Image (cartoon, grey):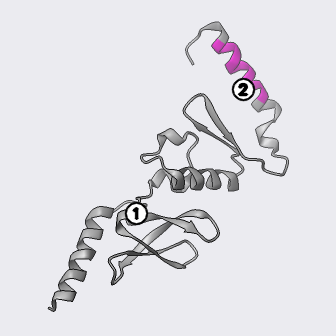
C-alpha cells in the first residue's frame, strides 16, 4: 500500500471511531449552511481526499463537512422531541431541525425546559390543539396543580 492509501485508510478509521457504529443516527452529522434547510442531518458516506467527510443529505445531495466541524446528530432529533433539553446534544442544528420536524407533524409547540416555549405559526387551523377534550385536560391539570395534588 502506498503512503497515500495508508493515510486515507487511517482517516476512514478515525471517522468511523469518531462517529460510532450502530443506531439510527450513527454516522450522521449536521450539514451547516444547507441550501434549503439551514442545518440538515446527513449520513457520512466517505472521507474525501482532503480529510473532510463526504456527507449525503435526505435528498441524496453530497456535501463536504470538515472533520473538526462535524457535530454528531442526536437520534431523538430525527423524530422530534417535545422538550429540547431531552436531546443528548443541544446545538443550533438540533434545535432548528427538531422544531422543523415537529412543525411538519403539526406539533407547533416545543419546550426548552419548563419556562421556555417555542411556538411556530402553522398558518392554518389545527383543531386537535384546541378541541374541547384538550381544553378540559388543561383545565383539570391546572385545577390539580392548584390543589397541590401530585401530577
Residue identified by numbered label 2:
137
* Residue occupying the point 44% across, 58% down: 73
Mark in front: 1 vs 2:
1
Return the disc, 1 or 2, that comes first in the chain's sequence.
Answer: 1
Question: In the displayed structure, would residue 47 be above or below residue 33?
Answer: below
Q: Main secondary structure of the magenta part?
A: helix
Label disc, if present, on residue 69 of the rendered structure: 1
Q: Is residue 81 magenta?
A: no
Q: Secondary structure at mark 2?
A: helix
Q: Position of residue 134 (x, y in %)?
A: 75, 32
State the extent of the magenta-drawn residues as a range: 135-145
Q: Position of residue 12 (x, y in %)?
A: 27, 76
Q: Position of residue 60 (x, y in %)?
A: 54, 79
Q: Residue furthest top?
A: 147
Q: Residues within 10 Å of mark 1 (few under 14, many from 20)?
A: few
Q: Is residue 134 left or right of residue 9?
A: right
Q: Is residue 21 left or right of residue 141?
A: left
Q: Secondary structure at mark 1?
A: helix
* Residue occupying the point 64% across, 55% down: 100
Question: In the displayed structure, would residue 122 be above or below residue 84?
Answer: below
* Residue occupying the point 82% across, 43% down: 127
Q: Is residue 26 left or right of residue 16?
A: right
Label disc, if present, on residue 129 of the rendered structure: none
Amino acid at each position: 500500500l502506498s503512503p497515500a492509501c495508508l493515510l486515507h485508510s487511517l482517516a476512514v478509521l478515525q471517522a468511523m471511531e469518531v462517529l460510532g457504529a450502530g443506531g439510527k443516527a450513527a454516522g450522521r452529522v449536521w450539514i451547516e449552511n444547507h441550501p434549503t434547510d439551514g442545518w440538515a442531518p446527513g449520513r457520512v458516506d466517505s472521507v474525501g481526499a482532503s480529510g473532510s467527510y463526504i456527507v449525503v443529505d435526505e435528498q441524496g445531495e453530497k456535501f463536504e463537512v470538515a472533520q473538526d466541524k462535524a457535530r454528531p446528530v442526536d437520534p431523538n432529533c430525527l423524530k422530534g422531541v417535545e422538550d429540547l433539553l431531552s436531546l443528548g446534544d443541544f446545538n443550533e442544528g438540533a434545535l432548528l431541525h427538531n422544531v422543523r420536524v415537529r412543525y411538519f407533524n403539526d406539533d407547533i409547540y416545543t419546550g426548552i425546559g419548563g419556562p421556555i416555549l417555542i411556538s411556530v405559526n402553522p398558518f392554518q387551523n389545527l383543531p386537535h390543539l384546541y378541541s374541547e377534550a384538550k381544553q378540559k385536560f388543561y383545565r383539570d391539570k391546572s385545577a390539580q396543580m392548584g390543589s397541590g395534588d401530585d401530577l
